[in-house]
Each structure stands twice: as structure tokens, then as C-alpha cells.
Amino acid sequence: MAKRKSSRTFVGLILLLTIFSLQIIGGKSLNTRNAEIRDNVNEFLPQAKNEDLKLKLEFIGFNQSLVDESEIESQLFSHFKHSSLIPQADLYFNFDFNYVEDEDRQGLEDYIDSIAVNGTDTGFELNVTKLYEDLYSGERSNIFIPRDGMSIDAELINEYLYQNLYQDPPADEPGYTLYLMNFSIFDTPDHSLEHWYDTYGTSIDANETVSWWYSGYRNISKRAAMGWGGKYRFAYIDLSSRSWYLDYVINAWGSLGIGSPSYYGYPDMDNLTQTHDVTTPSGKDILTEYLTDWINSYIGNVFAGPCFDPPLAKSISLQVKILNNLTDNGYPEEDLLWCISKQRIKDVLDNDFPWIDWRIEIEWVELTDEPGLFDYIQMNVREDINGEYIEVSEGLFSVLQNELNTHFDMNAADEVLPCYFFLTNNIAFRWFGTSFAGLGGMGWEILKATQYSLFEGGNISKPMRGMSAVMIHELGHSLGLPHPHSSYGWGSSYLESVMSYFSTSEKFSSFYKDAVARAHADAHYLYAVDEFANAFQVFQDEGSPAEFDATLELINKTLNVFIPQNYTRMDYNTATALGLTVRDLIQSFLNDLIGPSETPTIPTTPTPAIGILAIIIFPVIFFANKIRQRRR
């Protein structure tokens, strides 16, 4: 593996040298330039990093006179800094309000008409009463009620917007776009006919249409969204459409911390405008709050690219130890191998975070071959109306954490992310009462599956849901990523993203790929600035030897031109790769100045202070303790 790391550094240096040679043609001589640098290196190196992003707000089908731009903008979140343990840029948002021309709105409306399925039983709504009956009984009823209206393919609309309305941000003006749509024309005033945007998915492991929902619910082959996004650098939300998802969130997941944005109070914007006269000052204020809360959910959860103190390692080892108790209960191991894939996981990670050397290992062992863990589980099984379970927070978590060095090779890479994957015979794992399929965000993970989560009805001939996507989701938390609903409301969940509870995708959204790469680019850049200042002091102390002029200029050019150029173009992957490479170059510069034996190695990852452990759950089932009444 050492060869691979050296090769990457070598390629990076070639890239730097190629760019550098092109840049200096016709420029100042090295002697002249380095004389300027020698005078005061601090004049050429930034001491802080502030970055601007523009968010284009594109309104489609809205009466412009009812959109109070100045009041909305005054309430929008505009400044973010996500990390505390590593250096990061401060992000500042600028906002651009636009209204799509009638011709373009009509074109989109006609397209929707041409692709939509319009009729009886084309969608679902949530039977909240049945949901709560299931809570108290432990049964699983048919909580999804067929309803009439217009079913629209969410992905087709995403592609239409990309091909016909979306414009990439200019090279010197990075940012994102949010389309806010109003197509109430598709609905009837009495709400007997509504419209929604359906999403579909195929299990990455089972290669079957995803028809399951959390909590053991089945036979729902599509998920109704109010919008979509994540493939490109934009998202859309149709505020006049309906989705049962937020009903489910409010009533079943309230104790997960769902916040209280005003849009929870209305099934759609039509309901709001029927309840309040938005042409009056008070009604317009309510509409302003409603629009602001929707936009802020997307800004804070999505466009700001939240990524909290990610590991900056060049190489990351993901080690999954599968503790299999299903084979002892009639499920041969060869019929279980499909449920998680080293190659499928690696393909996603290599594509989405290509500057990291990913090393994936999956090991299968019988749970009975680990008698300490097997006996602990056997002795701590409990049972309630939902079946048998282990409360992980009451001991098993500590046992697993304390035995990481026993079960995993913690020196396999710069950063090691271990994962215990339990396959048990219909025994659930819970975290403070919440059943989960994945628990992560600790720098290590726990996965949990049974025969009934992997196979339809436990039938070995009917694979249903594998765990590769859950593994990628939990690993995302260890990379610093939250859910796209974590802090600013759940309305921004409608994304094609492995980090969303709503999506069936195994991939990271473009926004979260940007988030991780931007965090790495910021950190490596700011570390490099500091390291270069220290190295330059050594250079001066050694008498400023002229043979280092070319190296000095290359480092300076990379920090002041190449990295900022790529960062501004939103090519965060290249900016990160250049940051890593220039740090290696600075280390070599120091080695050549005073010798490697006297030069401390520049750390790839800072030594973190003791922080608060953030544990994030991928849920199986969770119900609110109190019924939240929704205004209708």
C-alpha cells in the first residue's frame, strides 16, 4: 500500500509542476519573485479564510407581489462555520431572487402534464390513527391509504430542470440553486385530487425494487416527495404538492428532534392560503415565515455543506466484522453473502471521495465463535410487544468499544473505521429505546440485521434489503456528515442521498460530496499556509539558499493561485488533492533544508481535543411519545 501512496504523491507533484510551468511563462523571473517573497512571506499568505456562496432562489408559479424578498432575506441563515477541531473557512451566503418567465413555467407545466399518471389510487396518504394503533399494539397494519391524483416522476422533473432551466454557476461565483414551485393548478380546491413527485429505488445488494418502509411496513414501491435533487448542484421543492413523509416524521419520529418549522403546520401551501388571506399584512407575514422556513431548511441542512471535524487521513480502512448467528438458525452463509459487498461499497467511496485511499475488508465469523459476545447477548435479551431486543446503551456498547483493538487491525491505515455487523435470529438492537439498523458517528459503527430485514417474510428465496447502503450511511457520519434534516427541519429530506432517511440511494448527494471535499480542502490549505510560514522561517534562518527558489515559488503559487482557482470553480476534489500535495512538498522542502532526522513529520490529521460523542441512528422503528396534532 505504501507504493500507492507514493504514486499518488508523485502524480500530484507532476500536476503541480505542469501547472506551475505553464503559469510562470511570461511572468516575473524566479529571482525577482522570490526577492518579494523573502521580504515578508506573511504578505502573500492569508491568515484566515472566508468564502462566499451564492444561493439562487428561483420562484416558479408564484405571484411576485406576495414574496417579501427583503423580509425573507433578513431571516435567512447566511453565515456558517462547521468544524472546531480543524481549520475551516467561514461560509457566507448571498441571495439572488429570481422569477421564472411565464414561457418557461408553461413549458414545465406542459411537460409535467405529459409524463404524469393521473387517476385513481395513484398514490398514498398516511393513516395517522392506524399508525398510533400500531404503536400501542405492536402490530403492523396497512397505514398507507391509496388516494387519487397526479403521480409525477421526481427524477424526470430533475432532469428537465437540469436540461432546460438550470445554469451552472460562473467560474468566479460558486453557489447553488433552489427552485421553489407552485403548481396548485394541478389540484382541486377540496383536495380530493392532489399531486406529488414519486421516487423509486433498487436495492444495491438485492437488486430488487425497494418496497419496504421503516418499522416493518411493506408493499410501498414508491415514495411520494414534494421535490427532489442531489444529482446536480440544485434542488427543487413544489410547495403546492403533498407527501405523507412529513406526516410520518411528525407523528412517528417526533422525539428524534424534528424542530418546529412553520411548514409542519400545513399539508401544503394551498392549505396555508385557504387558511390565511395572504394579501393582508398578517397573512403575508405567515406566508413569509413559511417560505423562509423552507429555504432555511435547505440552506442549513444541504447547501451549507455541513461537515463536522472530518478525519483528514490519506488512507482510510473500513473493516467490517460480520458476527453471524443466522447460519446456526437455518440460513447458510453462502445465501447471506449478498447482503453486504466490499466492491459495491468501495465503488461508491472511490467515486465520491477519490483523493482518499480506501481499504475495505469484510470478515465473516460465527457469533458462537466469539463466546463473550454470544453469551452477553443471550443473557441480556428482553421482550416487549415489539419482540425480543437488546438495549445496546446499557452495556453492550461499552463492551464493543473496549474490544475494538481485539477485533480490528487499528494500524491498517492512517484512519481505521471499524464496524461490528450482527446478524441475529429476530432479535432487535435498540439505542435508548430506538431500534436501529445502523449506529454510527463514534469513529466506529454497529450494523444490525435479521432474517426478516434481509428477506421478505424471512424467506431465503426472496432477498429484500441488504446492508451496503446502511454501511455507507453510517460511514458518512464518521466522515463528519449529518442527515439532511439534522438541524433545520425535515423538509430538506427530499434528496437523492444515502444520508437521507427518505432516499433509497447508496450514493452521496452532490451537496455532501462538496461538503466533505470542501472541508478537506479548507483544512489542508490552512494547515499548508501555517506550515509554509514555519518552513519559510527555517529557510531564512538557513541563509535563504538560492537553490530552493523554484520550490519556493511553486509552493507559493500553489497556495495563492492554483488552490484558490479550483476552490472558486467548486472543483473541491482538485483543491484537496493540491492541498495534500503541497503539504508533502513543504515537508520535503523542510527535509532538504535541515535533514529529515531533524524535521518533525507534518500530521495529516490534527490531534483532536476531547469532544462530545455524537451518535447517529439509522432507524428501524421509532414512535413519538406524544401525539402531535397537525393543523388541517
Image (cartoon, rainbow, N blue to C red):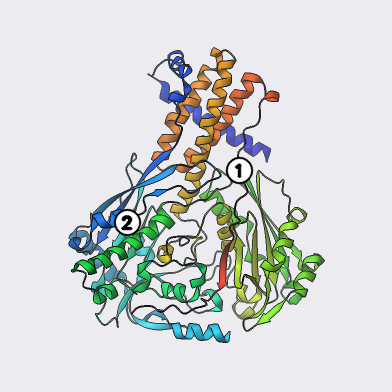
Helix, strand or loop status at disc 2 = helix
> Mark 2 = which residue?
75
In the image, 483 versus 323, the foreground residue is: 483
Q: Residue at 52% across / 43% down in the picture?
A: 520
Quarter of the figure that contains the C terminus: bottom left
Instruction: Give the image location of residue 626, x and y in percent.
Output: 49, 78
Q: Residue 453: tell me if it is visible.
A: yes
So how many labels did they put on this image? 2
Q: Residue at 26% across / 69% down in the picture?
A: 183
Helix, strand or loop status at disc 1 = loop
- Estimate how packed mark 2 is, as few (under 14), some (14 to 19) or many (20 or more) residues with alpha carbons within 10 Å: some
* Identity, as a three-letter code, of the amino acid under mark 1: Ala
* 67 displayed left or right of 574: left
- Estimate how packed mark 1 is, as few (under 14), some (14 to 19) or many (20 or more) residues with alpha carbons within 10 Å: some
> Mark 1 = which residue?
313
Instruction: Give the image location of residue 134, x and y in percent.
Output: 53, 84
Q: Residue at 53% across / 48% down in the picture?
A: 353
In the image, 238 versus 46, the foreground residue is: 46
Numbered disc in front, either 1 or 2? 2
